[in-house]
Image (cartoon, grey):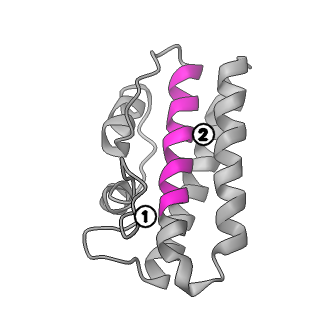
Amino acid sequence: MKRQVEDWLFLAQKDIDTVEIILKESHLTNIVAFHCQQAIEKYFKAYLLHHDKPLLKIHDLIKLYGMVKEIKDWNINEELLAVVNEAYTETRYPGELGLISTGMPTERQAIDFFDLAKKIEAKARKEIEIM
């Protein structure tokens, strides 16, 4: 496996580990959303690099998944992916981190985001391992 792919998988795992620790804290749903977005972005980038695609410095999960689908459609919930995508923020100002268009994610949404991130993790690791 390419070193750069390993690095992205390693960093994505740190985001997943963070979510596993804080998911039980109902007041941290925005932080859960942010780390889920980050993990998904990193898994997509690892997969794309594994397939010798250029590393684009973008954070848009919809665009990244579009690139993934050019290789293989993972059949993930794209509506939920779009909501998780909202959790990325260019800045780290108070009141912005991990918020989605409706504000603070609910506990249910945080769990759904984590479930999606775990599904994407499994797909990325399986697809990379197969090659």
Query: Can you name the residue that lies furthest to the left here?
Result: 101
User: Magenta segment, which residues?
Assistant: 34-50
Residue at x 40%, y 77% (from the top left corner): 105
Quadrant including the N terminus: top right
User: Measured along the vertical axis of the image, is residue 12 above or below residue 130?
Assistant: below
User: Measured along the vertical axis of the image, is residue 13 above or below residue 65?
Assistant: below
The answer to which of marks 2 and 1 sits earlier in the sequence is 1
Q: Is residue 98 visible?
A: yes
What residue did someone put label 2 on?
124
The image's mark for residue 98 is: 1
Q: Residues within 10 Å of mark 2 (few under 14, many from 20)?
A: many
Residue at x 64%, y 53% (from the top left corner): 15
Quadrant including the C terminus: top right
Considering depth in this image, is 55 or 53 the residue closer to the camera? 55
Q: How much space separates mark 2 and mark 1, taking CA atoms?
A: 23 Å
Position of residue 98 measured from the top left corner of the image (x, y, whole percent)? 43, 64
Tag 2 secondary structure: helix
User: Measured along the vertical axis of the image, is residue 124 above or below residue 2?
Assistant: below
Q: Amino acid at mark 1?
A: Gly
Q: Is residue 46 magenta?
A: yes
Position of residue 30 measured from the top left corner of the image (x, y, whole percent)? 47, 71
Magenta stretch: dominant secondary structure: helix
- Please give the count of numbered marks on the rendered protein: 2
Whether residue 105 sits left or right of residue 115 in the image: it is left
Whether residue 85 sits left or right of residue 34 in the image: it is left
Q: Is residue 42 magenta?
A: yes
Tag 1 secondary structure: loop
Position of residue 119 measured from the top left corner of the image (x, y, whole percent)? 57, 55
Q: Is residue 130 visible?
A: no
Whether residue 45 sits left or right of residue 3 in the image: it is left
